[in-house]
């Protein structure tokens, strides 16, 4: 929505006109426009909307921004909006604000809903439990289709997900799932336990990334989340998973670039925060790169005897770093998608070594040709070609093994970023280069 148009509608204060206008816009677009308003107009905008519309817009904001708006509303208005916001979003907001603020805000929720939100708040961050929403519809196995439909009409307005009904027993244990379609087309007197299907569920403590992988693997639109007693505590929907996959992909991209991931968008991140995210890795890489200088110093005599060897140092170490970066990027993605596991390490090594051999041979021929074009001695060109082959194979091996080892140790394989692999291969590549030179040139 055009910002000037939104300001005009707010200043006019005509609730019906504003509601009719915003109905044609997506909540995310409205939220982006609202963020550009001053605090007073933000408050007026939310006040003029219906609780449902206001909740849809507020859900798109960051947790602290959500609270800054809600706590300035009247208790009645804030309570009405809070009840319309998805339970997982409410839980995230409560965890982001001060404990006393959260206590006061939770008092605005109905007792039963507050209990569910407080339960979600107990699960560790980045788990299925913290991602789950409590706005689902459950039913008892003994209920008939007609009873269930009456229940859906009663509670369906506040439910985030209505395509499937989760069947539980008296203790809340998940028995199975039945689609809304099957309930509608079956005979009204049919009990749910006669038409339910087994439900694929996830533990509340399963990592978000694994949950996203499961939903993607089976093309589910939602998956129920259970506790240790197999009691249903919530549902993770595909829209939540999309957010998780986007966050994980963003995090991996940052780490592959040798930087800590940003919590906020680029323009919402201050210059000092960018400095903090980057400086640690840059210092680590700077110190690690220092050993390259030590290698050069160790082989100072070799370099002084054959000055032409120095011409090809950037070419060779650059080739090694690029090879390692390509391999790491491929394997980090494969690990994230569940295509590769630690038990496949020997298959991966064999595959990458074969690929490294083929690419290394191609690059070795080109490197030898480049040396010949520069007019260096035949033996020096041979050294360059053999070294190029060896470095590519070595970089392929290192970049294939390290991500798998880190994944096995429960560490993030994206930490083996492009810059880190490049730094590692730089030093070892120089050792290979000068060793080959000493052997072939008899220095």
Image (cartoon, rainbow, N blue to C red):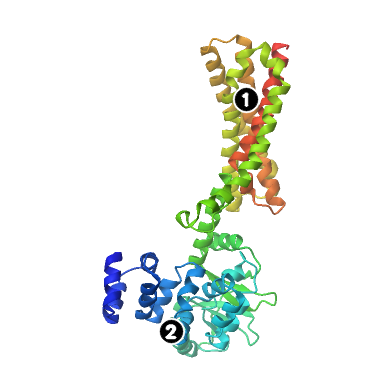
Q: Could you say where residue 325 lies in the image, as x and y percent from the top left?
A: 58, 38
Q: Could you say where residue 267 lies in the image, as x and y percent from the top left?
A: 45, 55
Q: Nearer the viewer, mark 2 or mark 1?
A: 2
Is residue 7 at least partly visible in the picture? Answer: yes
Q: Residues within 10 Å of mark 1 (few under 14, many from 20)?
A: many
Q: Could you say where residue 161 lies in the image, as x and y percent from the top left?
A: 48, 75
Residue in front for this viewpoint, 188 or 306: 306
Q: Quadrant of the C terminus?
A: top right
Q: Which mark is residue 428?
A: none
Q: Which mark is residue 389?
A: 1
What secondary structure is marked by label 2? Answer: helix
Which quadrant would residue 289 be assigned to in this image?
top right
Q: CA distance from mark 2 to mark 1?
A: 69 Å
Residue in front for this viewpoint, 246 or 162: 246
Residue in front for this viewpoint, 345 or 3: 3
| Tags 2 and 1 touching, CB below 8 Å | no
Residue in front for this viewpoint, 107 or 213: 107
Residue at 67% across / 37% down in the picture? 287
Residue at 57% across / 45% down in the picture? 256
What secondary structure is marked by label 1? Answer: helix
Q: Could you say where residue 429 lies in the image, as x and y percent from the top left?
A: 66, 28
Residue at 38% across / 64% down in the picture? 32
Q: Which residue is mark 2?
A: 77
Q: Quadrant of the N terminus?
A: bottom left
Is residue 1 at least partly visible in the picture? Answer: no
Comes first in the chain, label 2 or label 1: 2
Does residue 224 sit above or below 388 in this rendering? Answer: below
Q: Residues within 10 Å of mark 2 (few under 14, many from 20)?
A: some
Which quadrant would residue 257 be assigned to in this image?
top right
């Amino acid at each position: 929505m055009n910002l000037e148009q939104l300001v005009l509608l707010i200043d006019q204060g005509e609730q019906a006109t504003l509601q009719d206008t915003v109905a044609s816009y997506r909540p995310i677009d409205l939220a982006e426009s609202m963020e550009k308003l001053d605090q007073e107009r933000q408050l007026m905008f939310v006040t003029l909307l219906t609780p449902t519309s206001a909740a849809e817009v507020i859900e798109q904001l960051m947790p602290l921004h959500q609270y800054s708006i809600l706590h300035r509303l009247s208790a009645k208005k804030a309570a009405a909006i809070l009840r319309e916001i998805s339970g997982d979003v409410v839980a995230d907001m409560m965890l982001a604000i001060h404990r006393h603020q959260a206590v006061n805000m939770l008092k605005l929720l109905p007792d039963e809903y507050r209990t569910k939100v407080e339960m979600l708040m107990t699960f560790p961050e980045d788990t299925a439990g913290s991602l789950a929403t409590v706005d689902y519809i459950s039913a008892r196995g003994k209920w008939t289709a007609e009873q269930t439909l009456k229940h859906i009409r009663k509670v369906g307005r506040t439910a985030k997900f209505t395509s499937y009904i989760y069947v539980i027993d008296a203790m809340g244990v998940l028995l199975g799932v039945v689609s809304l379609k099957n309930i509608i087309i079956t005979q009204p007197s049919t009990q749910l336990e006669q038409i339910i299907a087994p439900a694929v569920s996830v533990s509340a403590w399963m990592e978000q990334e694994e949950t996203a992988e499961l939903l993607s693997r089976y093309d589910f639109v939602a998956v129920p989340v259970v506790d240790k007693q197999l009691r249903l505590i919530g549902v993770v929907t595909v829209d939540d998973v999309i957010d998780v996959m986007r966050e994980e992909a963003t995090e991996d991209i940052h780490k592959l670039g040798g930087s800590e991931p940003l919590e906020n968008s680029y323009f919402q991140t201050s210059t000092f925060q960018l400095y903090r995210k980057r400086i640690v890795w840059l210092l680590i890489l700077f110190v690690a790169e220092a050993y390259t200088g030590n290698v050069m110093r160790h082989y100072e005599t070799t370099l002084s005897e054959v000055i032409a060897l120095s011409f090809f140092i950037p070419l060779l170490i650059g080739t090694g770093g690029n090879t390692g970066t390509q391999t790491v990027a491929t394997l980090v993605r494969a690990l994230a998608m569940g295509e590769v596991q630690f038990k496949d390490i020997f298959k991966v090594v064999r595959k990458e070594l074969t690929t490294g051999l083929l690419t290394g041979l191609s690059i070795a021929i080109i490197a030898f040709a480049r040396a010949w074009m520069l007019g260096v001695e035949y033996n020096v060109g041979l050294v360059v070609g053999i070294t190029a082959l060896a470095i590519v194979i070595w970089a392929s091996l290192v970049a294939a093994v390290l991500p798998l080892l880190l994944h096995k140790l429960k560490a993030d394989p994206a930490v083996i970023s492009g810059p880190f692999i490049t730094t590692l291969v730089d030093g070892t590549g120089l050792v290979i280069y000068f060793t080959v030179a000493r052997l072939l040139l008899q220095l």
